[in-house]
Amino acid sequence: MTELTTEPPLAPSLGESPASASTLVTGPGPKLIIQIPCLNERDHLPATFADLPRSIPGVAQIEVLVIDDGSSDGTSEVAAELGAHHIVRFPRNRGLAAAHMAGLDACLRLGADLVVNTDADNQYRGDDIARLVAPVLEGRADITVGDRQTDTIAHFSWVKRVLQRWGSALVRRASGVSVVDSTSGFRAMNRKAISTLFVHNSFTYTLETMIQAGKAGLVVDNVKIETNAQTRESRLFSSIPEYLRRNGLVILRAYGMYWPLQTFGFMAAFLVLLGVALGGRFFYFYMLEPDVSGHIQSLQVGVGAVVLGFVVGLMAYLGDLLAANRRLNEELLARVRRLDAELASDRRRRGIAVEGILSTNAQPWRP
């Protein structure tokens, strides 16, 4: 088994400053890290690892980062034997979203200019990675998402295809970006995107990061890809109802976080209009028969609806203030991430291991 050691001294990382979609990556070429979140994937990881490209035009070096999300089957040891360059291991399972974000944080500190996220079950083809990173390399996008063309995937049921189209349409509406396959985990991103994205749920990163990318003004592009034959059932959810429940909560929470004024404002307006309508109904019948105290229930419900509408409107206002504060905090965290990456780069140059990352003696893949 390959021994896990402290990371050897590296040359200064290429492109340490954040890249943007408006500029091309210059210099000898960027450093690409392919990150693979894993949970008990010792049987599938070898095929996934073997399928990864060893060189990509325009990329100076490629490294592989495996995020072991509390596996109990020796996934980390298998990754080291296969020649993975870096390993981040959780002592217990924390979920896909946490594993994904830990990987992005590690990639920043390891000096990655580009990051590709792929699955450990070999769902995505390694040959497509070159096409996936091309728009980012050319400066046309901050994030590219692999479009699996789900209508052509044989093992997708018609229900799953309909839900995928519906979910992607909802994310497009919420985010303002033209993402075709919002649940695809096959993605490439530059340093600007890596340092900007944050995930606030424990279920999955796919939907929330797209919504956040739209709010942050990141450029998102779609790349059509093909998928390999299914090797196992999804471990993210056990049934369609569970998927709907958990992803529905993610989208609802994202709406509340990023558009509180609109979300709660519509609810407040509806309640006030309902209260006014019910109150108007009471007064209409009262004017017809002033001596008859009928329809008093309409007045009571109407007054309650108006009061509740004002309360929800206040919630909308407070939510908007909190959202503004959260945006400032996220901008501050993004700057802290970049500073932390600079400090980690300096530590690597001095031969000091990066905290929380096990680096093997495997050499980077170069053209």
Image (tube, rainbow, N blue to C red):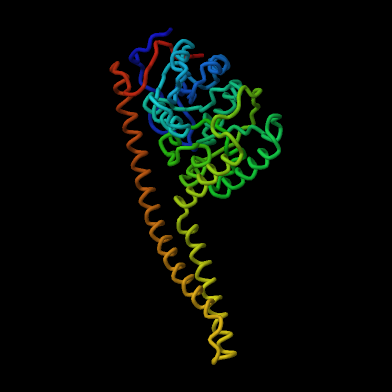
Residue 343: name its quadrant: top left
- Position above or below: 45 against 142: above
Residue 359: horizontal and vertical position, in percent? 38, 16
Q: How many marks?
A: 0
Direction from residue 207 to residue 360 in the image, left or right: left
Viewer-proximal residue among 194 and 75:
75
**Residue 238 screen position, x and y as percent:** 57, 34
Q: Quadrant of the N terminus?
A: top left
- Report whether residue 156 is seen: yes
Q: Which of the pair 321/94 is nearer the observer?
A: 94
Residue 349: quarter of image: top left
Asked if 259 appears above or below 42 in the picture, the reply is below
Q: Quadrant of residue 319?
A: bottom left
Which residue occupies 37% across, 56% down? 321
Instruction: Pinpoint residue 9: horizontal percent, then vertical percent.
Output: 33, 15
In the rendered structure, the answer to whether residue 333 lies left or right of residue 266 reads left
Observer able to see residue 55: no
Q: Is residue 5 above or below residue 139?
A: above
Query: Can you give x and y, in whole percent of width and height, for residue 186 in the image?
Result: 56, 30
Which residue reaches farthest bottom?
291
- Measuring 64% from the left and 24% from the top, which residue is drawn there? 230
**8 with respect to 41 (left or right):** left
